[in-house]
Image (tube, coloured by chain):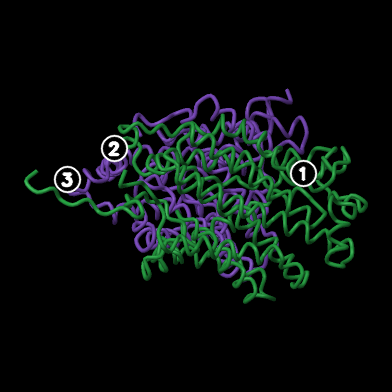
Chain colours: A purple, B green
Amino acid sequence: MIWVETVMQGVTLGGLYALFAAGLYLVLGVMRLANLAHGAFIVLAAYVILLLASLLEIGPLLAALIAAPALFAAGWLLQRLLLNRLLGEDILPPLLVTLGLSIVIQTGLEKGLSAQSRRISPGPLETATVEVGPAVVSLLPLLSLGSAVLVVLVLQWVALRTATGRALRAISDDPATASMVGISPPRLLAGVTGVSLVVATIAALHAGTLAEFQPASGTAYLIIAFEAVLIGGLGSPWGALAGGIVLGVAQTAGAALDPEWEVLAGHVAFLAVLLVRPRGLFPRASG
Amino acid sequence: MAWRMSTRTPASVAAGLMAVVLVGGAVVLPAYASFELLGELSILLTMLVLAQFWNLLAHHAGLVSLGQQAFVGIGAYGLFAAVIAYRLDPLPAILVGGASALVLAIPVAVLALRLGSVQFAIGTWVFAEAVRLGVTQWNAAGGGADLSLPLEAREGMLGADWVGATFDVEAAAARDILVYWSALALAVLTVGFVYRLLRTSGGLGMTAARVDLVTAQSVGVRPARMRWMVFLAAAFGTGVAGALIFLQGARVAPDTAFDMVQWTICVIFIVVIGGLGTIEGPILGVLAFYFLQRALVGYGDWLLAVLSVLAIAFMLFAPRGLWGIVHAATGLQLFPTRRRLVRNRGEVPPKKAAGN
C-alpha cells in the first residue's frame, strides 16, 4: 500500500502548494497582474511570524494573526501607490516592477537577517499524526490541506455571493465598463492585493512550520505558485487547489521513483498539462 | 519616380559612420588595451547580445521570456561537449553551442508560442528549470559538477598562433583576444540583424501585431511565422553568447550556466534601464550596467538590488528608459525604423500645375 501513502502525501503537499497559489490566483484572476513578488512576500511573512513569535514569546498562530493585518496593509499600499499606475493591456510593466520588488525584498532579508535557514517552531503539533484509512499521516501537512480548502471556500463564497465579489468579477471581465457603473477599481484592487498577502501569510505559517526557509526560498515558492495557478486555470479558485494537488502528487510520485526527480517531476507535470490544456483545467469562459 | 521610401535620417547616417569607426577601433583595440579590459569588454558585448535579443522578443514579438538562461546554458554545454567529446576546435565549436540552443528552442516554441502571455513567461521559466535539473542529473554532463576545457584545446585554438605572433603575447592572452573578437563580431552581427529585421515589413508588422493584434490582422499582418522565426533566432544568438561566455571562463557548471538571475533577470533590468523597444536602449543599458558595477566594487551583492530599484524607478517615471530621456531631449534616433517618403536627389520639386 505504499502508493496510497505516496498519493496521500502528495495531496497534503498539494494543499500547501494551493495556499501558495491562492493569493497569486486572486491578483492574476481579477486584474491579470502576474505578481512575481508573491514568493518573496510569502518569505517576508514567514520572517515576520518568526520574529513576532520569538520576540513576544507567543505561538506561531497568534503571531500570524498579528502579522496578517500588517501584510494586508503592505499589499494595500503596494497596489495603491505602485501597481495601479501600471495596469493595462500590456502585462510587462507590472511584471517588471514586481520582479524588481522580489529582488529588493530578498536582498533586504539577506542583509537584515542573514541568509541562514530558519524554521518556525510548530510546538507540540510537530510530531502529531492521524490515521486516514490505511495510511498514517502527520497532522501538520493535513492542516495545510484543511487551510487550503477553507481559503478556497471563502474566496469562492466572496466571489459568488457578495456585492464585492460581483464588483470584482465585473472588473475582471471589463474594467472600463465596471468603472462606468460606479465601481471604483483603485480602492477595490488595493483590497484584493491586501487579501492576497493575507493568504500569503497563511501560506507562510504552514510553509514555515513544515520546513526550513531562507530569503532565497521565495523563488521556489513563486514557481510552484504559478505552476499550480496555471495548471488549475483562472476560471475558479478550485483550480488553484486542483493545480496544487496535481503538482504535489507529481512531486511525491517522482520522489518515490528517485529522490532527485522530485522537483523535476513537478515541472514535467506542469509542462504536460500546458501541452494538453494551454489554459489550464478550469479556464475562464472568456479572455 | 520623384519619391522613394527611406528610414534614413542625418543622425542615422552620422551614427552609421561613427559605428564603423567605433567597430574599426574595437577590432584593433587588443594592440593597445590591457587584458583585463578586453575580458570585461567580452562580457559586456555578450551581455549586449542577450539584451538585444530579450528586447526583440519582449517588446517587438510580445514574447516575454523568463527562460533565456536555458539557451545560455545549453549553448555553453554544446561547446564543451563538442570540444571534450568530439575534439572540435573551440572557435568553430561556438557555433555548435548556438546550434544546440536552436535545437532546444524547437520543442519550447511548439509548446510555448500558442500560450497566453503569462503562461508563456512562466512556461519558458519552468522549461529552463527542467533543463537545468536534467543537466544536473545527467552523468555524461558531469552530473552537476564542474567541467573544464582541456588545456591543449584552449592553447591550440584556431588562429591562436597567428594572434600570438602578431601581438607578441602568450597563448592564454591570444585566446582572450580571439574570444574578444568573436564577442565583438557576434554583437555587431546581432545589432545588424535586429536593425535589418525591424525595417522589413514582416518586422514592422510583428511590432504592430504586439500593439494591436486585431487592427494589424485587418491589414494583412500574420505575426505567427515571424514570432517563430524571432524566437528561434534569439535562441541561436543567446546560445552563441552562452558558448562564448563559458569559453572565456573555460569552466562550466549547471548552476552558473543556467543561472536565471545572471542571464535573464540582470538582462531584463539592463533593457529596462537603457530603454525598452529600441536598439539604442540595450546599448545604453549595458554601459550603465558597466559603470554601476565599477561604482559598486566591493559591494557586489548589492548590484542586483540597485539594478532592481533603478529598473522600478524607470518603469514608474521614465518607462522608455535612458534612451527615452535622450530621445525626448534631442529627438535623436540612431537606428530609425520609421519609413518616410523622401524626394530623390537632384530632382526638382514638381511644380503645381496651374488650372489642373
| Labelled disc at residue B115 | none
Is there a contact, CB below 8 Å, between mark 1 and mark 2?
A: no
Quarter of the figure that contains the C terminus of chain A: top left
Q: Of the residues under marks 2 and 3, which one precedes in the sequence? A: 2
Residue A184 in picture, x, y percent from top left: 23, 52
Going 59% across and 28% down the picture, which residue do you hit? A272
Res. A122 in view: no
Question: In front here: B190 or A151?
Answer: B190
Residue B245 in picture, x, y percent from top left: 73, 54
Residue type at mark 3: give it: Val
Q: Secondary structure at mark 2?
A: helix
Q: Secondary structure at mark 3?
A: loop
Quarter of the figure that contains the N terminus of chain A: top right
CA neighbours of label 2 inside 10 A, class few (<14), some (14 to 19), many (20+): few
Q: Is residue A160 left or right of residue B245?
A: left
Q: Is residue A258 left or right of residue A197?
A: right
Using the numbered discs, state the Cα–Cα distance from disc 2 to disc 3 in whole angstroms. 19 Å
Residue A130 in picture, x, y percent from top left: 64, 36
User: Which residue is most to the right?
Assistant: B152
Chain of the residue that carries numbered disc 1 in the rendered image:
B
Chain of the residue that carries numbered disc 2 in the rendered image:
A
Residue type at mark 2: give it: Arg
| Labelled disc at residue A181 | 3
Res. B267 in view: yes
The residue beneath circle 1 is: B77
* Total numbered circles: 3
Residue type at mark 1: give it: Tyr
The residue beneath circle 2 is: A161
CA neighbours of label 3 inside 10 A, class few (<14), some (14 to 19), many (20+): few
Q: Is residue B46 left or right of residue B229?
A: right
Question: In front here: A111 or B177?
Answer: B177
